[in-house]
Amino acid sequence: MTLAQLRYAVTVSESNSMNEAARKLFISQPSLSAAIKSLEDELGIKIFRRTNKGILVTPEGEEFIGYARQITEQYGLIESHYINKESVRQKFAVSMQHYTFAVEAFMRVAEEYGMDEYEFAVRETRTAEVIEDVKTFRSEIGILYLNDFNRQVLSKLFKENQVEFTELFNCDIYAYMSKNHPLAGEEKLSIKQLEEYPCLAFEQGTENSYFLSEEQLSAEHYKRIIRVNDRATSLNMMVGLNGYTLCSGIICSELNGNEYTAVKLEENQPMTIGYITRVGGNL
């Protein structure tokens, strides 16, 4: 196995086409195919599956590509620093469910360590993609939550994807809404009181499952529900439609403004918010 083969595999995975990858690598398509075939034979796995829609990465291949990408990126840093004598910035990326407090924490890290030395990336995304990003080294850490409902399923996913969960803190369930919402002044709320207002839930795409939901009480039957895919849209729906979402109750007014509030729910299903890292990985 050579560094060139690792680069070839990573490029093919990003191109989804042997012809396109060969063009990027400035080699012939037969030479690239032969190199990938030799690598697969040596590893004893199929990295890619050829279909009429192009090249797809196999489940075994996804894990290998994660390792290969890490090695080629590290080599690139060494090459730039020692051979090309360039000033190279290290990379730090975080994937997360849609948590404002996590974005605020990320901003503090960026300010403390400086953008001259680090290239930062933050990805607000779906639950399954948070796990996938950490598994494949796309992100250093992923931020999500566990509770009694999803703990068993997510713990199994963590084990299968070779990531481990570290607890940050525990919190109760709150309804997050506009301060102009008719129920914003209540001390506590029940799901029954909220049923005439739209519940805003982040969609999970093809991986959709109650267990992967970002919101607590995901298995509840909601009379009115709207699926959204970003935080800004959710905030707009809170103002325009008196919508609400279920959350940790941690409000970051510095980022979202002072127009929103969180009211505690009577339903008790505490959540544990934490972060996942690759097993055996070094931050």
Image (cartoon, grey):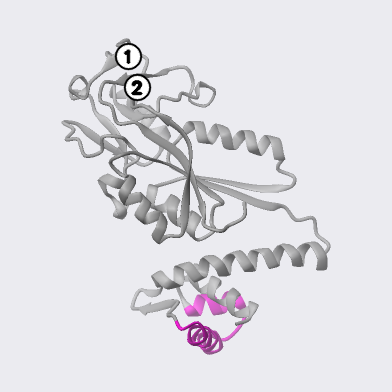
Label 1 sits on residue: 184
Report x, y in % for residue 21: 53, 75
Picture quadrant where residue 22 is located: bottom right
Image vertical order of residue 277 relative to residue 270, above or below: below
Q: Do callouts 1 and 2 mark residues in contact (Cβ within 8 Å)? A: yes
Q: In screen coordinates, is 270 left or right of 135?
A: left
Q: Residue at the spot x=61%, y=77% of the render? A: 25
Tell me where residue 52 appears, x and y as whole percent.
33, 78
Across and down, in percent, residue 253 comes to: 50, 21
- Say if the magenta span includes residue 186: no
Vertical arrangement, residue 77 with respect to residue 231, above or below: below
Residue count near mark 2 (Cα–Cα under 10 Å), binned few <14, some 14–19, many ≥20: many
Lateral position of residue 163 relative to residue 280, left or right: left
Which residue corresponds to the image point at 80% horizontal and 59% vertical from the top-left?
A: 86
Please give the residue where the numbered disc 2 appears in the rendered image. Answer: 177
Q: CA distance from mark 1 to mark 2?
A: 7 Å
Residue at the image position 42 percent from the left and 31 percent from the top: 170
In-image side of 59 versus 9 (left or right): left
From the image, which quarter does the N terminus lie in? bottom right
Q: Determine whether, in the image, residue 161 is placed left or right of residue 94.
A: left
Looking at the picture, which amino acid does disc 1 mark? Ala
Secondary structure predominantly adopted by residues drawn in magenta: helix
Q: Which of 73 and 159 lies nearest the eye of the viewer? A: 159
Q: Which residues are magenta?
A: 18-44
Q: Secondary structure at mark 2?
A: strand
- In primary-sequence order, the first of circles 1 and 2 is 2
Residue type of the residue flagged with mark 2: Met
Check disc 1 and report its element: helix, strand or loop. Answer: loop
Query: Circle 1: is it few (<14), some (14-19), or many (20+) Cα within 10 Å?
Result: some
Q: Is residue 251 above or below residue 14?
A: above
Q: Is residue 177 above or below residue 62?
A: above
Query: Residue 92 placed where, x, y %?
Result: 62, 49
